Amino acid sequence: MAKKLLKKNFKKVLAFDLGGTKLACAVVNSQGKILEENKILVDLRQGPRSLINQFVELGTPLIKKYKLKAGAIASAGPLDPIRGILLNPTNLKTNGASWGVVPLIREVQKKLKIKLQLENDAAAAMWAEHWVGSGRGVANIVIVTLGTGVGVGVLANKKLVRSGRNLHPEAGHIIIDHQNTDSKNAAWLCGCGNYSCAEAFLSGVNFTKHLSEKWSEPNLTGEKLVARARRGEEEVLIEFRNYGKRLASFLRSLIVLFSPEKVILSGGFSHAADLFLPTCEARLRELLTTRREGVDLLPQIKVSQFRDEAGLLGAAYVALARAF
Ligand SMILES: [Zn+2]
């Protein structure tokens, strides 16, 4: 599909990336180049209404300036990409209250007056890697985004993997430990309301929150944790190594399901991979010992080369692929 896109003579599209904390908006051309980009903190105070106004605020000037006709929104899930609706999104809430079903595409399209598509942000990040990133030419990719939440996007046999009913597979909410459900251990409560989802352990936000509570350090941030680990504080390094082992267990499940040649770690927390990836890879080799012969399931693991822009580039890819 990438080759076909290149022939589309520098078409430009509007791309949005909606996360739990930021909304980014960019104009991207059919070569995968970002021409202009703006971002703001997500305003969740009045529920979906204030958020939809933010889409309009960011999108309108760019649509006028570049005379855009089409675009796409990459968003945190769960969502229905075909119907263009958010389904009780895990990381978008107002004062802890869930949003239920939000007809996002219909509402934003009505105001911006251009054709829009919706895609899960991890699927968008996967398309970005496949299009212009380290997944170019690779037919089987699993991307794991480690940010506010944990998202998974899968390319198998060059096709995006959907789950049933055209939904996106929300693999970040696979429960990887049953004991915290029995004890209702609030330390491992996931944003989806269950205990011990992969996301409850592995999102950068939850990893930091857990250590902040464990060590009674309310002002702990992800940046501080990374800085302390890089200074060699053993107590912090142990936690990153434990994180690496948990990530290996999660990746092992995804690998035996989807057999990727390449696993790409993306999202803010992936930039701390030097602190957990060596442990993760060593554990993964152990966990896949019996799956190396004939077809070697041990994948190459890469950290995404994109800092923030994978969601935007993936949204642009989706807009170009579906709209023209
Ligand atoms: Zn969950």
Image (cartoon, helix red, strand yellow):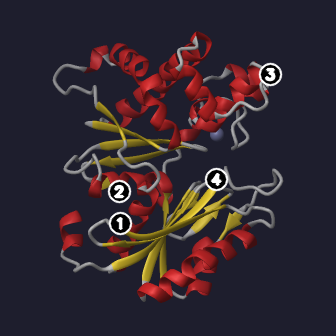
Which residue is drawn at the image coordinates 61% and 29% (left, top)?
A: 201
Viewer-nearest of discs 1 and 3: 3
Q: Position of residue 219 (x, y in %)?
A: 76, 32
Q: Looking at the picture, which amino acid does disc 1 mark?
A: Tyr
Provide residue 225's location: percent of width, then percent of height.
Answer: 61, 27
Q: Residue at x 62, y 12 (%)?
A: 235
The amino acid beneath tag 4 is Gly
Location of mark 1 (residue): 317
Q: Residue at x 39, y 68 (%)?
A: 316
Name the residue beneath numbered marker 4.
20
Question: Alpha-carbon distance for marks 4 and 3?
Answer: 25 Å
Under tag 1, what secondary structure? Answer: helix
Res 165 visible: yes
The residue tagged 2 is 127
Q: How far, Cα to Cα, is label 1 from label 3?
A: 44 Å
Q: Mark 3 against mark 2, which lies toward the viewer?
A: 3
Does the beta carbon at disc 1 come under 8 Å from ligand 1? Answer: no
Look at the numbered disc 4 and say if its residue's Cβ is closer than 8 Å to ligand 1: no
User: With respect to residue 39, does 295 lie above or below?
Assistant: above
Question: What's the CA distance linking mark 1 and mark 2?
Answer: 7 Å
Mark 2–mark 4 Cα distance, whole angstroms, equals: 20 Å
* Ligand 1 visible in quadrant: top right
* Foreground: disc 4 or disc 3: 3
* Viewer-nearest residue: 275 or 160: 275
Q: Earlier in the sequence, mark 2 or mark 4?
A: 4
Q: State the separation of the CA atoms marked 3 and 2.
A: 40 Å
